[in-house]
Image (cartoon, rainbow, N blue to C red):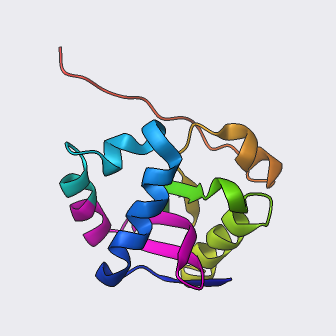
Amino acid sequence: MKIKKYSKADETLLFDLLIDEGDEWSDYHGEAGRDKYIKALESSITYIACDENLVCGYARCREDDGFGVYVYDLLVRKTHRGRQIGKSLMERVCQDFPDQPVYVMSDVDTYYEKLGYRREGSIFEVKAK
């Protein structure tokens, strides 16, 4: 298993992972969202975990000018879960940004609690009235 930074050349392999996850990730890989997500990937720091030519997992994050790194997406292929891939991806983010806090934007709280990460508040969606 190799973790590397994502590049445009990995786009098809990454989208294969998203498509394999099904409807839950269709906002990213579906017709309406794919182009937007490609732009998001271009402006993000993304790591992929590869097993030869198969993307087994990925983490997409953004750095906030020294105030922290925010992980927006973390996904491990269903067939590869339980192998510490998600944890390894998170460790890579921390390794590459040793002087900054790393925060996760997620609704899968139990996974991050199991890894021993501490809760730091919450997130709210704001809509104009």
Examine the image and state in which quarter residue 77 appears. bottom right
Task: Report the number of numbered marks.
Answer: 0
Q: Quadrant of residue 49?
A: bottom right
Q: Residue at x 58, y 79 (%)?
A: 50
Horizontal side, residue 67 vs residue 88: left or right = left
In which image quadrant can residue 66 be found?
Answer: bottom left
> What range of the chain is rendered magenta?
38-65
19 or 32: nearer the viewer: 19
Q: Is residue 51 above or below residue 77?
A: below
| 55 relative to 113, above or below | below
Q: Specify whether 111 is left or right of 64.
A: right
Q: Is residue 34 magenta?
A: no
Asked if residue 40 lies left or right of residue 21, the reply is: left
Compared with 88, 53 (above or below) is below
Q: Quadrant of the N terminus?
A: bottom right
Residue in view at x 47 percent, y 42 percent: 22
